[in-house]
């Protein structure tokens, strides 16, 4: 299995916060996928679980194709895909806390 999108983005200085450090306890790594790619993931059985859906309910700028980057394992399906970051995040974890990737 590949690396999750949150860790990969952080390694490449993409501003995804990940306040809970990828344990599905916040929505600060919320991303918006292209419609066709979102549908492809669902068709492949790679859909959001209950914990992810619960956290997405707290996300700023929620869209029908929203996912948490910490729950997306990057593989060859991601080649050429455009992923949108919302304009803001809601950090209920600790205001201003930005964890450092391990």
Image (spheres, rainbow, N blue to C red):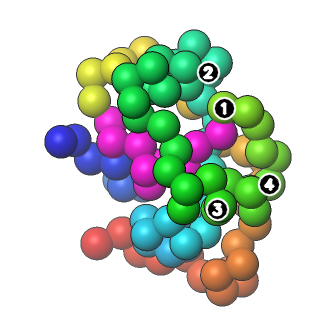
Residue 78 against residue 97 in the figure, above or below:
above
The span shown in magenta is: 66-74
Label 3 to label 1, Cα distance in Å?
14 Å
Residue occupied by mark 3:
55
Residue occupied by mark 1:
65
Q: Nearer the viewer, residue 83 or 13?
A: 83
Q: Nearer the viewer, mark 2 or mark 3?
A: 3
Q: Nearer the viewer, mark 2 or mark 1?
A: 1
102 falls in the magenta region: no
Residue 42 against residue 16 in the figure, above or below:
above
Of the numbered discs in the image, which one, if any, rests on residue 34? 2
Identify the residue at horizontal 64%, vertical 81% (top origin).
93
Of the numbered discs in the image, which one, if any, rests on residue 84? none
- Sequence-wise, the earlier of marks 3 and 1 is 3
Label 2 to label 1, Cα distance in Å?
7 Å
Label 1 to label 4, Cα distance in Å?
13 Å
Instruction: Assign a secondary structure to mark 1.
Output: loop
- Residue 81: x, y in percent? 48, 20
Label 4 to label 3, Cα distance in Å?
11 Å
Would you say the residues marked 4 and 2 are in contact, meaning their CB atoms lie under 8 Å apart? no
- Sequence-wise, the earlier of marks 4 and 3 is 3
- Sequence-wise, the earlier of marks 2 and 3 is 2
Q: Nearer the viewer, residue 32 or 25?
A: 25
């Amino acid at each position: 299995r590949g690396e999750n999108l949150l860790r990969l983005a952080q390694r490449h200085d993409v501003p995804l916060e990940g306040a809970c450090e990828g344990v599905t306890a916040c929505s600060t790594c919320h991303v918006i996928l292209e419609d066709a790619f979102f549908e492809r993931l669902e068709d492949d059985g790679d859909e959001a679980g209950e914990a992810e859906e619960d956290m997405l309910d707290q996300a700023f700028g929620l869209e029908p194709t929203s996912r948490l980057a910490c729950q997306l394992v990057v593989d060859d399906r991601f080649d050429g895909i455009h992923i949108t970051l919302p304009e803001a995040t809601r950090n209920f974890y600790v205001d201003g806390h930005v964890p450092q990737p391990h």
